């Protein structure tokens, strides 16, 4: 047996070699389309953390089938060392191993290598290499309910569940669980959502869909509250992390439900930002959905005896125009709330400028009522600004909409780029 036994000691076309490595992943056996033959891929890692794929075909798969186990360390020897196809993702920059008739695999007695957990990624790593299956430890901030969606292309049905997670570097991200992980492990997470739950996700990928998200694949596994040093680190960070992210203004608003928005602790004047997915139940106001707005400061113009006045600008007869202002009643399965929505966002909701709607109201009240009814029961994602304000001697929580996002038809691809199936 050679002394080094490291993956980096392998060279192209070398036939006789030996490496000591742990099996990080065993892919399912795949049949070739022709029906002639099968292939299976192992992901190996040595004690330096270098990885390489070991690929087996046909009788080699049968030969080693019973002895291979994820997380166990083996001595692999002999076989073909082949250059990788650079068009496809590979764990190794140069080579992959083809295990063949001269190959041997023995259980390593002494050299137990700590599997995958030594090689945890952070969200940033996955952003820079989204198609490469990665392992990551995450703190769960929020658990959404299960959703059924249909793929646009073939109307195939999928079950998914979104989590809001944060990593060891305090980066917050949406993590989509698919299929069984959404229903089984996802349910477990839902049930413990009031606790600080840590998950170890193995073999996840990144996707760009309405911003960057993490996603499971068919070979992803989830371990809930794993006993790892990083779990403790993450728990220690968690208070700080949650606080930072709820109160910071960032592109990634924390996705949460109405109950959390209504009850989050906030000092007077402090501003927090969230995103939330809610259903519009109606308007919470009488009268017009607009006001005369000072063109300079957007404040409400008061018109007394035909003379316009902006109190804020202390100006008589300022320029002014109509501007939308509505109070929406919204709800999700946790609570209800009133959102204040201004001009652009209302125009987006109603689908026409304020001057058009004003004309419709004046000319045909039935059409107008239909337009208002049409915005009800819509489910949308709102990014909101939350602030406690004082009014007289009491304070109230003001929730102002910053932007509105449609829940678009989701186009998904469940599988990451896979190694091309090619025969020797
Ligand atoms: Zn003004």
Image: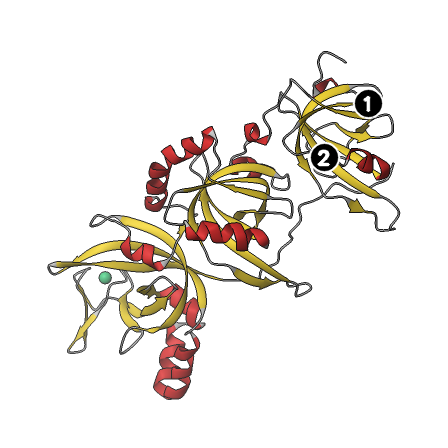
Nearest the eye: 17 or 168 = 17
Residue that numbered label 2 is attached to: 42
Seen at 85% across and 30% down, the residue is: 100
Tell me if 128 is positioned left or right of 415 in this view.
left
Nearest the eye: 340 or 334 = 334
**Where 198 falls versus 357 (above or below)?**
above
Seen at 36% across and 42% down, the residue is: 242
Marks 1/2 in contact by CB < 8 Å: the verdict is no
**Where 295 falls versus 5 (above or below)?**
below
Ligand 1 within 8 Å, label 1 CB:
no
**Where 330 falls versus 21 (above or below)?**
below
Tell me if 157 is positioned left or right of 420 in this view.
left
Q: Residue 145, how many percent across, how many down?
A: 47, 58
Q: Residue 189, how many percent across, how many down?
A: 46, 49
Q: Residue 11, how many percent across, how many down?
A: 79, 20
Q: Residue 295 bears which disc, if any? A: none
Q: Is residue 324 visible?
A: no
Seen at 27% across and 60% down, the residue is: 296
Residue that numbered label 1 is attached to: 78
Query: In which quadrant of the rendered image does the C terminus lie?
Result: top right
Ligand 1 within 8 Å, label 2 CB:
no
Tell me if 328 is positioned left or right of 124 in this view.
left
Which of the two discs, 1 and 2, labels the residue nearer the N terminus? 2
Quarter of the image where one finds residue 20: top right
Which SS class for mark 1? loop
The residues tagged by marks 1 and 2 sit, at their Cα atoms, a distance apart of 15 Å
Which SS class for mark 2? strand
Q: Is residue 53 visible?
A: yes
Neighbours of disc 2 within 10 Å: few (<14), some (14-19), many (20+): many
Neighbours of disc 1 within 10 Å: few (<14), some (14-19), many (20+): many
Ligand 1 shows up in which quadrant of the image?
bottom left
* Residue lying farthest to the top in this orientation: 3
């Amino acid at each position: 047996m050679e002394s080094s036994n490291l993956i980096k000691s392998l060279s192209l076309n070398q036939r006789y070699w030996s490496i000591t490595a742990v099996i990080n992943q065993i892919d399912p056996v795949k049949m070739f389309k022709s029906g002639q033959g099968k292939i299976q891929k192992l992901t190996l890692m040595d004690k330096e953390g270098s990885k390489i794929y070991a690929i087996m075909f046909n009788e080699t798969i049968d030969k080693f089938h019973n002895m291979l186990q994820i997380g166990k360390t083996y001595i692999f020897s002999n076989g073909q060392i082949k250059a990788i196809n650079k068009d496809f993702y590979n764990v190794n920059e140069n080579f992959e191993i083809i295990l063949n008739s001269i190959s041997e695999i023995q259980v390593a007695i002494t050299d137990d290598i700590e599997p995958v957990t030594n090689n945890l990624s952070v969200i940033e790593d996955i952003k820079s290499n989204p198609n490469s299956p990665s392992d990551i430890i995450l703190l769960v901030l929020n658990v959404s309910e299960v959703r059924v969606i249909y793929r646009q292309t073939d109307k195939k049905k999928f079950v998914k569940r979104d989590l809001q997670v944060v990593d060891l570097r305090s980066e917050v991200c949406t993590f989509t669980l698919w299929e069984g992980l959404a229903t089984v492990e996802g349910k477990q997470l839902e049930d413990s959502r009031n606790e600080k739950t840590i998950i170890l996700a193995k073999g996840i990928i990144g996707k760009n869909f309405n911003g960057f998200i993490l996603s499971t694949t068919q070979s992803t596994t989830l371990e809930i509250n794993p006993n790892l040093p990083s779990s403790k680190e993450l728990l220690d960070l968690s208070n700080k992390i949650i606080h930072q992210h709820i109160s910071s203004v960032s592109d990634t608003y924390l996705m949460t439900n109405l109950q959390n928005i209504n009850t989050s602790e906030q000092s007077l004047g402090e501003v927090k930002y969230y995103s939330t997915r809610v259903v519009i139940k109606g308007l919470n106001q009488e009268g017009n959905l607009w006001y005369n707005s000072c063109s300079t400061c957007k404040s409400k113009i008061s018109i007394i005896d035909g003379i316009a006045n902006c109190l804020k600008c202390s100006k008589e007869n300022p320029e002014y125009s109509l501007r939308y202002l509505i109070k929406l009643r919204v709800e999700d399965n946790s609570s209800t709330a009133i959102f204040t929505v201004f001009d652009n966002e209302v125009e987006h909701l109603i689908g026409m400028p304020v001057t058009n709607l004003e004309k419709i109201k004046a000319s045909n009240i039935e059409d107008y009522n239909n337009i208002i009814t049409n915005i009800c029961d819509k489910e949308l994602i709102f990014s909101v600004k939350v602030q406690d304000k004082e009014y007289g001697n009491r304070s109230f929580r003001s929730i102002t909409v910053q932007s509105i996002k449609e829940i678009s038809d989701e186009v998904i691809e469940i599988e990451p780029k896979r190694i091309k199936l090619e025969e020797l």
